[in-house]
Amino acid sequence: MVSGVRFATGSAPRQGGASVTAQRFHLSILDGFELRAGGWTLLAGRGEAQRLITLLALRDRPVSRGVVATMLRPDAPEAQGLASLRSALSRLDPDVRHAIVTAGADLALTPDVSVDLRDARAFAQRLLDTERPLPWTDLQQEASQSLQALTLDLLPGWQEDWAIMEAEAWRQLRLHALDALSVHLTRAGRFASAVGAAAAVLQSEPLRESACAALIRVHLAAGNRSEAIRVFTEFRARLTRELGLAPSPVLCALLAPALP
């Protein structure tokens, strides 16, 4: 079986009639939708099946058919929505259908499905846990793997109300987590990665003062005073131009040691 061949919809080819779902599933919903198993892409893009699987992936527990039907067809009567859901389930490719488990009136993803959002969200929450903070040595290895995930948007381009709400909730969580990650990386002396984390926040939200502060701290810790001043000057000009505001005294005081 050749790994990495993409199939947008339908079945992935099998060797000797063997199902690819003997392998674990991996579902990506950050930066777009893709369901993979055994090295094959079973489902990608946007469509009815993708919306159904994504709804289940966004929940950490089984979801009633009625709730799923309402979210998939919000303008349809309940009976029509349930009928549409039954039809959608019956049309799923057999390999894709193995990713969903039915428990009475509830639906859920099988435990064999790993979801990139769940992993990234768990890492973000560990970074932000002030009651039980993890030592940086415990976070270090995971940070190198999760930094990119924290820079990715959830389901970009999806227009459903529930997708937009979930995408905004993830955006806020990942931005706070990137702020925290930049602090951890700076303390560990990993300045290049710390700059990447803080810059990713500013790219997503250019007027976010906490991200500007994090980036200034990185440059000061690395001994790059000119870069710290440049970041502050550009941020101050942008803030004044777009909002008519000045940087806070806290941000100005942060830069004071770098000034003559």
Image (spheres, grey):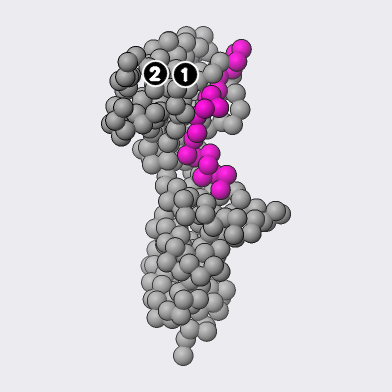
Q: Secondary structure at mark 1?
A: loop
Vertical position of residue 230 compared to residue 200: above or below: below
Task: Give the residue at mark 2.
Answer: 19
- Disc 2 residue type (three-letter): Ser
Q: Residues within 10 Å of mark 1 (few under 14, many from 20)?
A: some
Residue 91 or residue 232, whichever sits in front: 91
- Which region shows up in magenta? 103-123
Vertical position of residue 130 compared to residue 36: above or below: below
Which residue is painted at 34% across and 29% down in the image? Answer: 40
Which residue is painted at 61% across and 12% down in the image? Answer: 104
Task: Give the residue at mark 1.
Answer: 98
Q: Residues within 10 Å of mark 2 (few under 14, many from 20)?
A: some
Q: Is residue 29 magenta?
A: no
Q: CA distance from mark 1 to mark 2?
A: 10 Å
Q: Earlier in the sequence, mark 1 or mark 2?
A: 2
Q: Position of residue 80 (x, y in %)?
A: 47, 10
Q: Position of residue 136 (x, y in %)?
A: 60, 60
Which residue is painted at 55% across and 79% down in the image? Answer: 253
Q: Is residue 113 magenta?
A: yes
Label ID, residue 168: none
- In the rendered image, is residue 121 in sight? yes
As drawn, is 131 to the left or to the right of 144?
Answer: right
As drawn, is 177 to the left or to the right of 92?
Answer: right
